[in-house]
Image: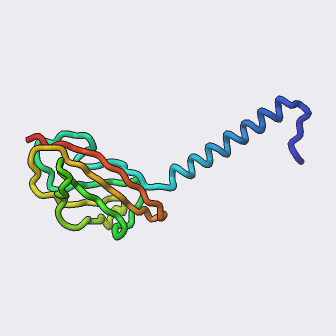
């Protein structure tokens, strides 16, 4: 039986409710459609007292390591990350890159990843080494 109402206010309220529901469903689906950086070690924006041996990035979805890139740059823009990007097969959401001994300064992390859902995400952050 179709929903009927002769009251124009009821129709407007129903249409508004339906529009809000459709918008919420669309936004929820879009929010799940991309992998985002969940956390990092060293933590984004942090100051570390010792040079970290590696950079670890955790994402909100599994990533395709063959089509992903993580770079660590010094203040002059020179790449300092050493070795190939490592994928954690036990947790497909984790990427690691080895670091050499870092001197005092600000380091920029730039990442670009392909999630298993085929969406590309990218971002950047900094951390400081202050021994």
Residue sitting nearer the eye, 11 or 3: 11
Identify the colour scheme used.
rainbow
In this view, the residue farthest toward the bottom is: 66
Identify the residue shown where x is 88% and y is 46%.
2
Q: Residue at x 30, y 64 (%)?
A: 88
In the rendered image, the vertical position of residue 4 relative to residue 84, given as above or below: above
Looking at the picture, tell me which residue is in the foreground, 18 or 120. 120
Residue placed furthest toward the front: 76
Q: Is residue 72 above or below residue 83?
A: above
Percent coordinates x, y for residue 87 in the rendering: 30, 65
Left or right: 49 in relation to 94 = left
State the residue in front, 77 or 110: 77
- Residue shown at 77% from the left, 33% from the top: 13
Q: Position of residue 76 (x, y in %)?
A: 17, 50
Q: Does 70 sit left or right of 38 as displayed?
A: left
**Total marks in image:** 0
On the image, the x and y values in percent for residue 102 come to 11, 51
Identity of the residue drawn at 41% across and 63% down: 114
Give left or right: position of 72 versus 31.
left
Q: Quadrant of residue 49?
A: top left
Q: Quadrant of the C terminus?
A: top left
* Farthest right residue in view: 6
């Amino acid at each position: 039986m179709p929903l009927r109402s002769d009251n124009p206010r009821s129709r407007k309220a129903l249409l508004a409710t339906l529009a809000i529901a459709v918008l919420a469903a669309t936004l929820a689906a879009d929010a799940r459609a991309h992998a985002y950086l969940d956390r990092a070690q060293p933590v984004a924006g942090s100051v570390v007292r010792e040079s970290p041996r590696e950079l670890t990035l955790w994402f909100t979805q599994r990533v395709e390591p063959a089509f992903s890139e993580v770079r660590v740059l010094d203040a002059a823009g020179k790449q300092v990350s050493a070795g190939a990007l490592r994928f954690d097969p036990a947790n497909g959401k984790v990427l690691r890159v080895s670091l050499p001994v870092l001197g005092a300064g600000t380091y920029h992390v730039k990442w670009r990843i392909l999630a298993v859902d085929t969406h590309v995400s990218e971002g950047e952050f900094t951390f400081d080494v202050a021994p």
